Image (spheres, grey):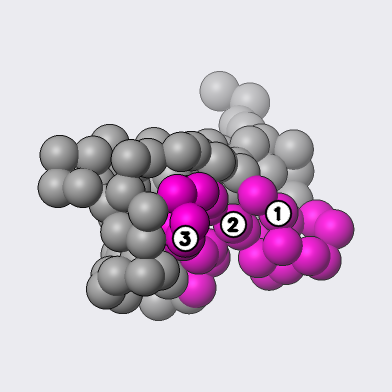
Amino acid sequence: MSHFKLIGGGACPEQYDVMLEGKRVGYLRLRHGEFRADVFSETNDDGDIKVVYEGSPRGEGSFEDEERHFYLQAAVMAIKLYIETRQIRGDSEPLYEISES
């Protein structure tokens, strides 16, 4: 799996689209002191937005400098884990091949 790319930033709210291999797989948003990471219907089974991470940073509409990396890293890790778990359940092509010898 390649690296995730975050597009966005700004303040009030601080928000990012989460891209993987050119496809939008998630959304991060900090507003009113509540931060969350969502995955979209293309990524999850129920065809709706699914919250995979929530946090309560000190920043109200944008992160304080010393907390940004922690929360962005945790959110991206939660999205990555969700996608990988989905793949393990068999919703995508196997990453392996079985041979007799």
Identified by mark 1, the residue type is: Lys
Whichever of labels 1 and 3 marks the residue nearer the N terminus, that label is 3
Q: Residue 6 at what x, y percent from top left? A: 32, 65
Few, some or many C-alpha atoms within 10 Å of disc 3 (few <14, some 14-19, many ≥20)? some
Along the line of sight, the residue nearer the viewer: 71 or 23: 71
Identified by mark 2, the residue type is: Asp
- The image quarter containing residue 75 is top left
Name the mark nearer the viewer: 2 or 3.
3
Q: Is residue 16 visible?
A: no
Along the line of sight, the residue nearer the viewer: 95 or 39: 39
Residue occupying the far left of the picture: 65
In the image, residue 100 above or below residue 37: above
Residue to which mark 1 is pinned: 50
Q: Which mark, by number, is residue 74? A: none
What's the magenta region? 24-51
Q: Tally the numbered discs.
A: 3
Whichever of labels 2 and 3 marks the residue nearer the N terminus, that label is 3
Residue to which mark 3 is pinned: 31
Q: Which mark, by number, is residue 38? A: 2
Residue occupying the far top of the picture: 101
Inter-mark Cα distance, 1 to 3: 18 Å
Name the mark nearer the viewer: 1 or 3.
3
Q: Image check: 9 left or right of 96?
A: left
Q: The residue tagged with tag 3: helix, strand or loop?
A: strand
